Amino acid sequence: MAKLEVLRYPNSVLRKKCEPIDVIDDEVVRLARDMLETMYEDKGIGLAAPQVGITRRLIVLDIGDGPLALINPKILEAEGAETMEEGCLCLPGINVDVERSTRVRVTGLDPSGRELDIDAEELLARALQHEIDHLSGTLIIDKVSKLKRDLLIKKYKKAQQ
Ligand code: NI
């Protein structure tokens, strides 16, 4: 396994729309493993492929009950709404109040090609939505008003200097 470099905002790769994965080959399996390793080392609970520079539809998560890797994840159902503070490994030092659905049903494939159908609530539902957002180039700073976003970006840039 290898730790990968996590890209930081405003790297343009983070804004790309990711491509579906048609074939789960060794490269995809290795990427999922390396992403999990990277997530654990950086103490995140989720990571999406574009965050390590790969614009393909793959996310990994572990909210404390074991690793989960999901290929071509898709939200089929969503309900409820709750606002909670979130961070992102691509925006170190920034926390944003983000409104998300409280329950989602997500499908996708695991690295062995098995179809998963996940009924998620609370933190898992939130983490899934956050990571799936990354696959369309959406970041937590996009979930707030322009005024708030401008302030956050200013704070972030200052902290990065
Ligand atoms: Ni993130």
Image (spheres, grey):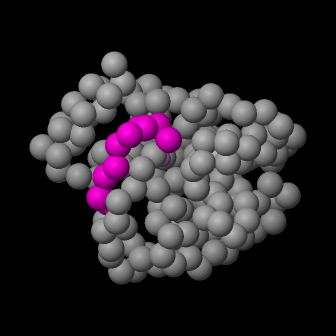
Residue 124: x percent and y percent? 55, 69
Secondary structure that dominates the magenta span: loop
Name the residue: 34% across, 49% down. 95
Q: Position of residue 106 (x, y in %)?
A: 58, 70
Vertical placement of 85 versus 53: above or below? below
Residue 131 among those drawn in magenta:
no
Query: Is residue 55 visible in this depiction of the protein?
Result: no
Q: Is residue 124 above or below residue 140?
A: below
At 46% from the left and 30% from the top, the residue drawn is 8
Q: Residue at x 36, y 80 (%)?
A: 80
**Quarter of the image that includes the N terminus:** top right
The residue closer to the viewer here, 25 or 10, is 10
Report the magenta residues as a range.
89-98
Q: How many marks?
A: 0
* Residue 140: percent from left, percent from top: 36, 49
Which residue appears farthest toward the left when viewing the image?
147
Instruction: Check the image and name the residue furthest to the top.
Output: 161
With 147 as the anchor, is 68 left or right in this view? right
Residue 114 is situated, as x and y percent measured from the top left of the image, at 81, 65
Q: Quadrant of residue 155?
A: top left
Which quarter of the rendering shows the C terminus? top left
Q: Which residue occupies 39% across, 45% down?
A: 139
Q: Is residue 1 above or below residue 102?
A: above
Look at the image and say whether residue 92 sits in the magenta stretch: yes
- The answer to which of 144 and 3 lies nearer the viewer is 3
